[in-house]
Image: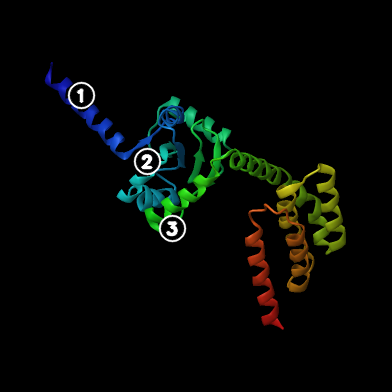
Amino acid sequence: MPRHLLACLALCLSVLSLSAAEGWLTDLDEGIKVAKAEKKAILVDFTGSDWCGWCIRLKKEVFDQKEFAAVSKDFVLVELDYPQRKKQSPEEKAKNKAWAEKFAIEGYPTILLMDSNGEPFAQTGYQAGGPVKYLAHLKELLKDNTSKGKSAFAQAKKDELIVRAYGEEISGLVGPLVEKKDLAGAEAALAKFIKDKKVTGSAKFSLNLNARVGIVQGCKPGDQGALLKVLDELIAEAPADTKDLDDVKQFRAQVAAAAKEKK
């Protein structure tokens, strides 16, 4: 065999060995096949490898650390890249774009956890603290790899789309009323909109939270008492499974502390 072919073959083998050592696939279809064969979950990293600062930090601080290799016990790793400078084949670009659209990926890095069939059950992103802490975080999320967990995740995604779709409409509807400082009118218009659209559950809570806080701050700027009243009503009406409820309660505590200090 000619020497140049031997050298080329050696280079190809070294690249393949490097990919295997890193443990990351770049094709989700292939990842699903491997996950089914090995009976594992799938960790998909949607990343902008050559421009996204948080993606680069996550890779450097977590994925590239030797301790993170323990992740292979539970997960097949797949990287779907959306670079700005790195060259990709048209086929890889098209497939990655299709996956991002299918799973409604809005930012990078997005870490999507899936069962062996490619059905998502949890989502996360950059987490500070290094590989050991991140492994513990993934282990906790792995508990949602159940029928109930997958259903809850799918519903949460639907709620996000509803909130995104109706958010701008609500702003256009109540904005002129807020400019007039018409608090009652703005809240009535919001309530009618949500009722007419038949929004319920967590989506209703999120829309009410975003809009009502904005309305009261716009109509009664600096009035912590009015803001606390709205927050208390929202907390009382929140569905039991609302994931953001603890954050809202923490915000309420901050407002209450500011009101106390002001007095």
The answer for how far apart the CA atoms under marks 1 and 3 are is: 40 Å
In contact (CB < 8 Å): disc 2 and disc 1: no
What residue is shown at x 42% (from left), y 46% (from top)?
A: 51
Looking at numbered disc 3 in the image, what kind of residue is underneath it?
Ala
Q: For the residue labelled by badge 1, is the local secondary structure a helix, a strand or a loop? A: helix
What residue is shown at x 71% (from left), y 49% (from top)?
A: 202
Along the line of sight, which residue is nearer the eye, 215 or 200? Answer: 200
Q: Earlier in the sequence, mark 1 or mark 3?
A: 1
Q: Earlier in the sequence, mark 2 or mark 3?
A: 2
Looking at numbered disc 1 in the image, what kind of residue is underneath it?
Leu
Looking at numbered disc 2 in the image, what kind of residue is underneath it?
Ser
Residue 101, x across and y down, in percent: 57, 34
Residue 77, x across and y down, in percent: 41, 38
Vertical arrangement, residue 157 with respect to residue 16, above or below: below
Which residue in the protein does label 2 denote? Answer: 72
The answer for how far apart the CA atoms under marks 2 and 3 are is: 20 Å
Which residue in the protein does label 1 denote? Answer: 9
Which residue in the protein does label 3 denote? Answer: 128
What residue is shown at x 66% (from left), y 65% (from top)?
A: 249
Which quarter of the figure has residue 152?
top right
